[in-house]
Image (spheres, rainbow, N blue to C red):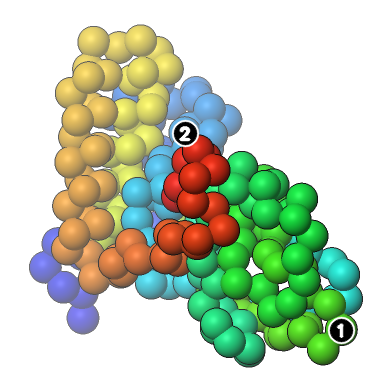
Amino acid sequence: MWGIGEVMAMTATALLARALKVIGDSTLTTEAQEWFENILYEVMAVGKWRHLQKNTTQVTANNDDEYDLPSDYNNFLVITSAASPYELIKISKDEMEVLRRKGDTGNPKLYAIYDTSYVMYPKPVTDALPTLTLSYQKTMSIPSASNEVETVTGLSSYWIKYLIDGVVAEGVRYIDDARQDSARIKWENGLMLMQRYCGQALPRGGSRVSRSSNLRGSGLPRGR
Protein backbone atom coordinates (compact mmCIF):
# COMPACT_ATOMS: atom_id res chain seq x y z
CA MET A 1 0.00 0.00 0.00
CA TRP A 2 1.30 3.45 -0.87
CA GLY A 3 1.79 5.95 1.94
CA ILE A 4 0.25 9.39 2.10
CA GLY A 5 1.99 11.64 -0.41
CA GLU A 6 3.80 8.74 -2.09
CA VAL A 7 3.30 8.13 -5.82
CA MET A 8 3.47 5.11 -8.07
CA ALA A 9 6.76 4.27 -9.79
CA MET A 10 7.53 6.67 -12.65
CA THR A 11 9.74 6.37 -15.71
CA ALA A 12 12.26 9.03 -16.62
CA THR A 13 10.27 9.86 -19.74
CA ALA A 14 7.09 10.46 -17.74
CA LEU A 15 8.91 12.57 -15.14
CA LEU A 16 10.52 14.77 -17.78
CA ALA A 17 7.21 15.12 -19.64
CA ARG A 18 5.58 16.47 -16.49
CA ALA A 19 8.41 18.92 -15.98
CA LEU A 20 8.33 20.10 -19.60
CA LYS A 21 4.58 20.67 -19.34
CA VAL A 22 5.19 23.06 -16.44
CA ILE A 23 8.06 24.72 -18.31
CA GLY A 24 5.83 25.15 -21.34
CA ASP A 25 7.96 23.58 -24.09
CA SER A 26 7.60 19.87 -24.75
CA THR A 27 10.29 19.89 -27.47
CA LEU A 28 13.22 20.24 -25.05
CA THR A 29 13.50 16.52 -24.34
CA THR A 30 17.28 16.23 -24.87
CA GLU A 31 17.93 19.26 -22.71
CA ALA A 32 15.56 17.94 -20.05
CA GLN A 33 17.60 14.75 -19.70
CA GLU A 34 20.67 16.91 -19.04
CA TRP A 35 18.76 18.94 -16.46
CA PHE A 36 17.66 15.73 -14.78
CA GLU A 37 21.27 14.57 -14.55
CA ASN A 38 22.27 17.95 -13.10
CA ILE A 39 19.76 17.78 -10.27
CA LEU A 40 20.64 14.19 -9.41
CA TYR A 41 24.24 15.31 -9.01
CA GLU A 42 22.95 18.04 -6.71
CA VAL A 43 21.20 15.38 -4.65
CA MET A 44 24.47 13.46 -4.35
CA ALA A 45 26.38 16.62 -3.40
CA VAL A 46 24.16 17.75 -0.55
CA GLY A 47 23.64 14.46 1.26
CA LYS A 48 25.23 11.25 2.43
CA TRP A 49 22.67 8.72 1.24
CA ARG A 50 22.21 5.34 2.86
CA HIS A 51 21.53 3.45 -0.37
CA LEU A 52 24.67 4.83 -2.07
CA GLN A 53 27.15 3.67 0.58
CA LYS A 54 29.61 1.04 -0.59
CA ASN A 55 32.65 -0.86 0.71
CA THR A 56 35.52 -2.34 -1.25
CA THR A 57 39.00 -3.61 -0.43
CA GLN A 58 42.43 -2.67 -1.71
CA VAL A 59 45.53 -4.85 -1.37
CA THR A 60 48.62 -2.69 -0.93
CA ALA A 61 51.78 -3.33 -2.93
CA ASN A 62 55.43 -2.97 -2.05
CA ASN A 63 56.77 0.59 -2.49
CA ASP A 64 53.47 1.86 -3.95
CA ASP A 65 51.71 4.72 -2.14
CA GLU A 66 49.15 5.72 -4.81
CA TYR A 67 46.01 3.79 -5.82
CA ASP A 68 43.02 4.50 -8.06
CA LEU A 69 39.76 5.54 -6.48
CA PRO A 70 36.88 3.16 -7.27
CA SER A 71 35.40 3.91 -10.69
CA ASP A 72 32.02 4.66 -9.09
CA TYR A 73 33.42 6.89 -6.30
CA ASN A 74 31.45 10.06 -5.56
CA ASN A 75 32.29 11.34 -2.04
CA PHE A 76 32.78 10.65 1.67
CA LEU A 77 35.80 8.36 1.54
CA VAL A 78 36.88 6.63 4.76
CA ILE A 79 39.88 4.28 4.67
CA THR A 80 40.49 1.66 7.34
CA SER A 81 43.46 -0.66 7.54
CA ALA A 82 43.88 -4.23 8.74
CA ALA A 83 46.91 -2.95 10.68
CA SER A 84 47.13 -0.30 13.39
CA PRO A 85 46.22 2.63 13.37
CA TYR A 86 43.19 1.10 11.56
CA GLU A 87 41.41 4.31 10.44
CA LEU A 88 43.61 6.49 8.27
CA ILE A 89 43.44 10.26 8.72
CA LYS A 90 42.65 12.48 5.76
CA ILE A 91 44.99 15.37 4.94
CA SER A 92 45.28 17.82 2.04
CA LYS A 93 47.29 17.22 -1.12
CA ASP A 94 49.72 19.98 -0.12
CA GLU A 95 50.39 18.29 3.21
CA MET A 96 50.86 14.95 1.50
CA GLU A 97 53.41 16.34 -0.92
CA VAL A 98 55.49 17.61 2.01
CA LEU A 99 55.40 14.16 3.61
CA ARG A 100 56.16 12.25 0.41
CA ARG A 101 59.45 14.10 0.14
CA LYS A 102 60.48 12.59 3.48
CA GLY A 103 60.28 9.10 1.98
CA ASP A 104 59.10 7.33 5.15
CA THR A 105 57.85 3.74 4.85
CA GLY A 106 55.64 1.53 7.01
CA ASN A 107 51.97 0.96 7.78
CA PRO A 108 49.98 3.85 6.26
CA LYS A 109 48.49 6.35 8.72
CA LEU A 110 47.41 9.27 6.50
CA TYR A 111 45.86 9.69 3.06
CA ALA A 112 44.96 12.44 0.59
CA ILE A 113 42.66 12.42 -2.44
CA TYR A 114 44.20 13.35 -5.81
CA ASP A 115 41.52 13.75 -8.48
CA THR A 116 40.95 10.09 -9.44
CA SER A 117 43.40 8.50 -6.99
CA TYR A 118 44.46 8.58 -3.34
CA VAL A 119 47.94 8.65 -1.82
CA MET A 120 48.97 7.17 1.54
CA TYR A 121 51.73 7.95 4.01
CA PRO A 122 53.98 6.31 5.07
CA LYS A 123 54.56 4.34 1.89
CA PRO A 124 53.69 0.64 2.35
CA VAL A 125 56.58 -1.79 1.90
CA THR A 126 57.26 -5.49 2.47
CA ASP A 127 56.20 -6.51 6.01
CA ALA A 128 53.92 -3.45 6.11
CA LEU A 129 51.36 -4.20 3.40
CA PRO A 130 47.94 -4.05 5.07
CA THR A 131 44.70 -4.73 3.25
CA LEU A 132 42.58 -1.57 3.16
CA THR A 133 38.82 -1.18 3.31
CA LEU A 134 37.40 1.80 1.44
CA SER A 135 33.98 3.03 2.54
CA TYR A 136 32.49 5.68 0.29
CA GLN A 137 29.45 7.09 -1.45
CA LYS A 138 29.11 5.78 -4.99
CA THR A 139 27.81 7.77 -7.93
CA MET A 140 24.08 7.49 -8.45
CA SER A 141 22.95 5.85 -11.69
CA ILE A 142 21.08 8.21 -14.02
CA PRO A 143 17.77 6.91 -15.43
CA SER A 144 16.59 7.68 -18.94
CA ALA A 145 13.70 6.80 -21.26
CA SER A 146 11.65 3.89 -19.88
CA ASN A 147 13.90 3.34 -16.83
CA GLU A 148 11.96 3.58 -13.58
CA VAL A 149 13.42 6.48 -11.63
CA GLU A 150 13.15 4.79 -8.24
CA THR A 151 14.67 1.51 -9.43
CA VAL A 152 17.70 3.10 -11.10
CA THR A 153 18.47 5.87 -8.59
CA GLY A 154 17.47 4.03 -5.42
CA LEU A 155 15.49 7.09 -4.31
CA SER A 156 12.04 6.49 -2.84
CA SER A 157 8.83 7.48 -4.60
CA TYR A 158 8.52 10.43 -2.24
CA TRP A 159 11.27 12.10 -4.26
CA ILE A 160 9.32 12.24 -7.55
CA LYS A 161 7.55 15.55 -6.89
CA TYR A 162 10.78 17.24 -5.86
CA LEU A 163 12.75 15.86 -8.79
CA ILE A 164 10.15 17.32 -11.12
CA ASP A 165 10.58 20.65 -9.32
CA GLY A 166 14.33 20.38 -9.87
CA VAL A 167 14.01 19.76 -13.60
CA VAL A 168 11.57 22.68 -13.83
CA ALA A 169 14.07 24.92 -12.03
CA GLU A 170 16.80 23.97 -14.50
CA GLY A 171 14.45 24.38 -17.44
CA VAL A 172 13.09 27.83 -16.67
CA ARG A 173 16.65 29.01 -16.10
CA TYR A 174 17.62 27.60 -19.49
CA ILE A 175 14.84 29.51 -21.28
CA ASP A 176 15.47 32.59 -19.11
CA ASP A 177 11.93 32.57 -17.78
CA ALA A 178 10.77 35.05 -15.13
CA ARG A 179 9.92 32.08 -12.87
CA GLN A 180 13.54 30.96 -12.53
CA ASP A 181 14.23 32.48 -9.08
CA SER A 182 11.07 31.15 -7.47
CA ALA A 183 11.52 27.75 -9.15
CA ARG A 184 15.08 27.50 -7.84
CA ILE A 185 13.97 28.34 -4.30
CA LYS A 186 11.19 25.74 -4.52
CA TRP A 187 13.67 23.05 -5.64
CA GLU A 188 16.25 23.90 -2.97
CA ASN A 189 13.60 23.90 -0.23
CA GLY A 190 12.33 20.50 -1.38
CA LEU A 191 15.87 19.13 -1.50
CA MET A 192 16.57 20.25 2.07
CA LEU A 193 13.24 18.84 3.22
CA MET A 194 13.98 15.42 1.74
CA GLN A 195 17.50 15.41 3.11
CA ARG A 196 16.12 15.94 6.58
CA TYR A 197 13.01 13.78 6.57
CA CYS A 198 13.11 11.13 3.83
CA GLY A 199 14.88 8.53 6.00
CA GLN A 200 17.55 7.81 3.36
CA ALA A 201 20.10 10.36 4.58
CA LEU A 202 22.97 9.56 6.94
CA PRO A 203 25.05 11.91 9.13
CA ARG A 204 27.74 13.52 7.02
CA GLY A 205 30.62 12.01 9.00
CA GLY A 206 33.96 11.20 7.48
CA SER A 207 37.61 10.73 8.20
CA ARG A 208 39.23 12.60 11.03
CA VAL A 209 41.26 15.68 10.16
CA SER A 210 44.99 15.35 10.66
CA ARG A 211 46.65 16.62 13.83
CA SER A 212 49.96 15.03 12.88
CA SER A 213 53.00 16.45 14.63
CA ASN A 214 54.90 15.86 11.37
CA LEU A 215 53.04 18.81 9.86
CA ARG A 216 53.16 21.31 12.69
CA GLY A 217 54.82 24.54 11.74
CA SER A 218 54.70 23.74 8.03
CA GLY A 219 52.39 26.67 7.34
CA LEU A 220 50.19 24.46 5.17
CA PRO A 221 46.39 24.35 5.44
CA ARG A 222 44.83 21.60 7.50
CA GLY A 223 43.28 18.66 5.71
CA ARG A 224 39.61 18.94 4.79
Residue 186 marker: none
Quadrant containing the N terminus in the rendered view = bottom left
116 on left or right of 7: right
* Position in image of residue 145 (x %, y %): 56, 49
Mark 2 or 1, closer to the camera: 1
In depth, the one of 93 and 7 nearer the eye is 93
Name the amino acid type tagged 2: Trp
Image point (61%, 62%), residue name: 111
Q: CA distance from mark 2 to mark 1?
A: 49 Å
Name the amino acid type tagged 1: Thr
Label 1 environment density (alpha carbons within 10 Å; few <14, some 14–19, many ≥20): few
Q: Secondary structure at mark 2?
A: helix
Above or below, 198 relative to 116:
below
Question: What residue is pinned by disc 1?
Answer: 126
* Position in image of residue 223 (x %, y %): 48, 50
Above or below, 223 relative to 6:
above
Question: What residue is pinned by disc 2?
Answer: 35
* Position in image of residue 168 (x %, y %): 32, 31
Q: Is residue 18 visible to us here?
A: yes
Q: Residue furthest front?
A: 217
Image point (60%, 72%), residue name: 109
Image point (53%, 34%), residue name: 34
